[in-house]
Image: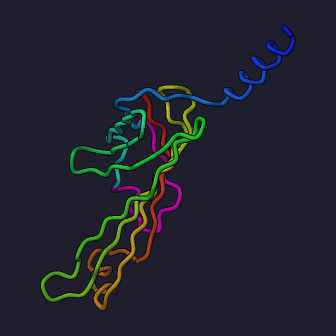
Amino acid sequence: MTRIFSLAAFVLTLAACGSIEPLPGQYAITSATVGVDTCELGGEADIEEEVITLAIDEDAVTVSIGDSDGVTFDCEMDKSDLVCEEVVQTQDAGGDDGDAMLTLAWSLGGTFADESTLDPGELSLNYSCEGADCDLFAADAEITLPCQTAFTITAAQ
């Protein structure tokens, strides 16, 4: 009978391996490497100055990037992986007489190396536009749409 309990404890220990419970609170982005950058924003997007706030309660995990004007993701933890829902923001970029609706889709995910370090993390910004004046808007902004800028990040408390 003791062997059965020992075996059960061993199996439960193995099942728990690879599962990290991250600490809630603020994480500083300590490094950011630009991967894909068809928007050509990599040099302008200084995200190493941004702060990520991780909030965990019994029902939800939320991650916010930046200050109160930033973006907030609804996430979940799958063992040590942070899996977040895409956040989509739209903006009328056509002005008073134009027809251009700009869409920015944010993606965030990653793996916690330990309870206070997200490494690697992936942050992606995907821009697109709908409307008759999107080409004019893109020319004024000096970008080609649709486009993507993606970062591999490390964030730590």
Where is residue 125, by image quadrant?
Answer: bottom left
Where is residue 64, by image quadrant?
Answer: top left
Q: Which residues are magenta?
A: 30-44
Number of marks in picture = 0
Considering only vertical position in the picture, is 142 above or below 75?
Answer: below
Residue positioned 40% across, 49% down in the render: 74
Q: Per the image, is 43 magenta? A: yes
Residue 30, image x, y percentages: 42, 35
Q: Residue furthest bottom?
A: 132
Considering only vertical position in the picture, is 146 above or below 10?
Answer: below
Residue positioned 40% across, 26% down in the render: 157
Q: Per the image, is 42 magenta? A: yes
On the rendered structure, is 93 left or right of 59? left
Considering only vertical position in the picture, is 104 above or below 79?
Answer: below
Front residue of 3/36: it is 3
On the rendered structure, is 89 left or right of 76? left
Residue positioned 22% across, 51% down in the render: 69
On the rendered structure, is 112 left or right of 87? right
